[in-house]
Image: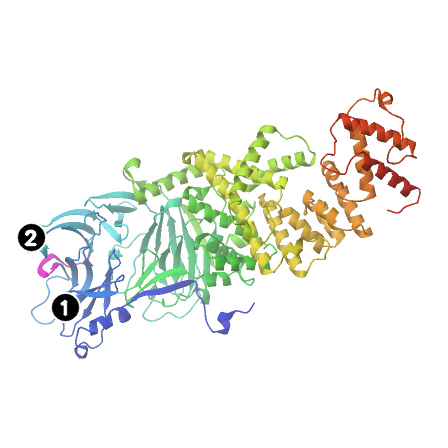
Amino acid sequence: MIDLNVILGQVTHMLRLNPTFDTQKDVVSSILAKEDRANIGVLEPRILSVERDGGLVYSWRGATGTTRIGKYDPYSTENKLLYTFDKQVCVSSCSLNKEETLLAVSLSQSTQGEGRFKPVSKCLTLLIEIHPINNTKVLKAVDCKVKVQFLYPKTCRTTVLESHLLLAAEDGYVDQYHIALTRQEGYRVVMQNPERLSRERVAEDFSWVQWDSDTQRLFYLTARDKHTLKCVQFFPDRNFEIMFELPLEMPKISSATSVRFVNFGYDHYQNLKDEGLRLEVFTSPTGTMCVCYSHPVRWHKDATYTIAFVHRGCSKTFTVSLEKGSAPANLPTIHPIFIHLDYYIVVYLAGHFLHLINCRQQDLLCYSLFLSGADAHIEALGLGSEVVSMSGSRLLDARAGRMYTMDLNPDFLLELLSSDRPEAQQLAALHCMLVYLQPNPVIELKIINWISENIMSFDAFDQIQEFILASLYRISYQQCVSLDKLLPYSCVLEKKELPVALTAIPGVKCTPELLCQAIIKGKAKSLQGYWEELQHVLERMRYFEAVPSPRFRTTLIKEDWIRFQAAMNMEKKKSPRSYRQIEENTKKVLSMVDTWRLDRRVVPLFQEEDQQQRVLVGLMVDKLREHLNRHLSRLGKKKIDLLVVNYAAKLLELVWHVLELVWQKLKLGPWVLCIKQQGSSEEWAMFHVMFRILEATKGLCLPLPPGYSTLLSVLGVRCLPRHTFLQYVDHGLLQLTEPFVSRLMTGLDNSDSNEQLKFSILKRLPEHIEQKVSQRWDHPTTSACISREYVRTLLDKHSESRDSALLDYGKSSFYPDFLPLNYLAKILSNREEQVLNPFEEQENVDVRFVEETALKQTLIKLGFEVK
């Protein structure tokens, strides 16, 4: 396969950064249109903060020695001037309230100025009325950093005359200011009582603090006795509450290290030297929480970082051996960057590695992706980049003046499936595309093509099993997140012993640990939104840790399936109650399949009963329903029944869909079903794919669409040598279904080789099926067998008493010269008048058929006629 990217000189990367804002493109032209370009010099707008509504607040140096603050609206793409300082100032923190009537600003001031007039404090925090520009109030004048952030409560009220401001100080406390506003002259919005603003303490004695604007949460880390992570939730009614506490076993933070602020805007005047701990908390609405932290990485040393999966109750510390190299003079130490991509945490150390860590399925390392060298490069992020990961998969590079949206590059993930990649990378890439990326028909087709071109199972995992289980997991999880810990998501979990290739990453050491129990404050009934979901996730986690094998294993069906198979082959009567339930299950599943567009299908499935697959479908529904009822009873029986039936239906649809795509790729048609012709290379390829799917599903004891076995046997008899075909049958690899044998008996002529094949197949059939299908083969031997069975069955119906009295010794109307045959024919005729014909389904099987067959067999025996 030719790689067009190589030909065109294009290089793909794991993470795609899509620019959504650039100060040079989106701001500069607007500023130049309003100011004298000649007096500005080099125009370099600086991003200060990103508010909850997506607006970006920035500053720039104006034409007359001023400092201006503006806002960019990403929805209207318009820029708006908010405020102008009449001199050049250093804005270290800035926030705009939701109504755009107040501006909070922290200014950094140098105390090393010349002359007698020096600033009294290092930081001056102001509250400014800007609708219109009016009063300015000094909130703080201190010798430590101060960060400001307005709350953006979600409220139904259109007019809000109150704002709430967080003020976070480097001294280790956060205050909330309640600012009452009033409207004057119909349009002026001013502070009602600026000299007496009410405030209350939100947090104190912390060494680290993070603001989450999208969820209005404040995380902070205290370290009195031991490190404890706490979270304050702010509500629309101006109240706030500590909702969460988690003790953390973390490295000791030096007392000399200053408080670190995360997501409180960007300070372009801060000292870039950072020797302290870097910590970030990421949450998602589905109830996940990850706490990520690392110490600075010194050159020629190992990089160590920890991800605490709060929703799983465990943490993993990774230690990565770095390649030796020369340290840049300006960067003696560096930090890995943490980026949140919903289901994944990206840990990136430019020039060294990129680690894509699965937040949901973190049990095994093989579901995370570790890349190094050129594979680990992220365009636009070099050594020393200071970026902030924001909600909605956004990334802010404030120093470069850009904002990006991020996503995983499916083209790069497809490249990781190539045969020269480690199997752990192949599995992680495949799992990522199937489970976590949005459904994409183009990507799905490429994956199926890859499977069909690499059809043999890998050493560490079966790619077909992985495709089936991962696809079904994604579909089911979207319907009900509670199925997360109950449904199988990978074929690897079915292995008794995991291959070494899936349990270790070369050059990476992983140390797992259990976390202390997280505490969610408040009563369970009063929890709402994210906290309710997290509480539910933690309760489920504790429950699943206490019960054995919570995840459903498809192999649980195997024992019952073997028992039912034996019963069907021996034609024993099944248990009426259990069999009736299984048949009802199957009918529900197939009724869902029948609602799909059958007219567009090209692969002939679902056109026969296929009793074995019907039983397996019903068994799977039965076992999965029983499993979910045991562990997830709160959903109710109706909901569980719907989920289970849909799961089985989607399985059949998925297999059918794969066959459709491969069938169309190979350009096959209805002639495939003609059993007389030899198979082509395309049909051989189709047989190989179908055979591997059979092998994969058999290993998991999963059902296939009715008609699958028949189609596979048709392809097998067309593509395989006759003796090989029979060996496949003897080893249970191909199934002699009734529709297939009937097609074979009627489709092939009675040449010597075909006759030998037919007899070989009849010998391998259970007796009850052999009797049934042999009637469809027009051959003297089968006719004789049918006649003998007909006579035996008919004579067994009644006792032989008084037969002689019933007989009329007149000649047979058919063959008047053969008296023994006349006698038998008369007995059978009388029996037919008294009992039902045992072969009434076969229209031609009657007394005359028996007479003709008997005479034909006699002529053959005497040598007067050949077979």
Q: Is residue 345 magenta?
A: no
Residue at the location (88% across, 47% down)? 866
Image quadrant in which you'd find residue 311 = top left
Furthest-bottom residue in this view = 38
Q: Residue 759 location in percent, x, y?
A: 79, 45
The numbered disc on residue 112 is 1
Whole-percent x and y of residue 30? 22, 71
Q: Residue at x 50, y 58 (%)?
A: 425
Give the prevailing secondary structure in the magenta stretch. strand
Q: Which mark is residue 195?
A: 2
Image-based side of 582 in relation to 266, left or right: right
Residue type at numbered disc 1 = Gln
* Residue nearest the viewer, comparing 397 with 318: 397
Quick one: label 1, few (<14), some, or many (20+) residues within 10 Å?
Answer: few
Depth check: give the residue in front, 96 or 373: 96
Is 860 displayed left or right of 234 in the figure? right
Sequence-wise first label, 1 or 2: 1
Inspect this view and state whether residue 59 appears. Answer: yes
Secondary structure under tag 1 reads: loop
Q: Helix, strand or loop at disc 2?
A: loop
Q: Is residue 461 visible?
A: no
In the image, the segment drawn in magenta is 128-147
Q: Which mark, residue 505?
A: none
Relative to 622, does residue 700 appear above or below in the rendering?
A: below
The amino acid pointed to by label 2 is Glu
Which mark's residue is nearer the viewer, 1 or 2? 2
Q: Nearer the viewer, residue 66 or 205?
A: 66
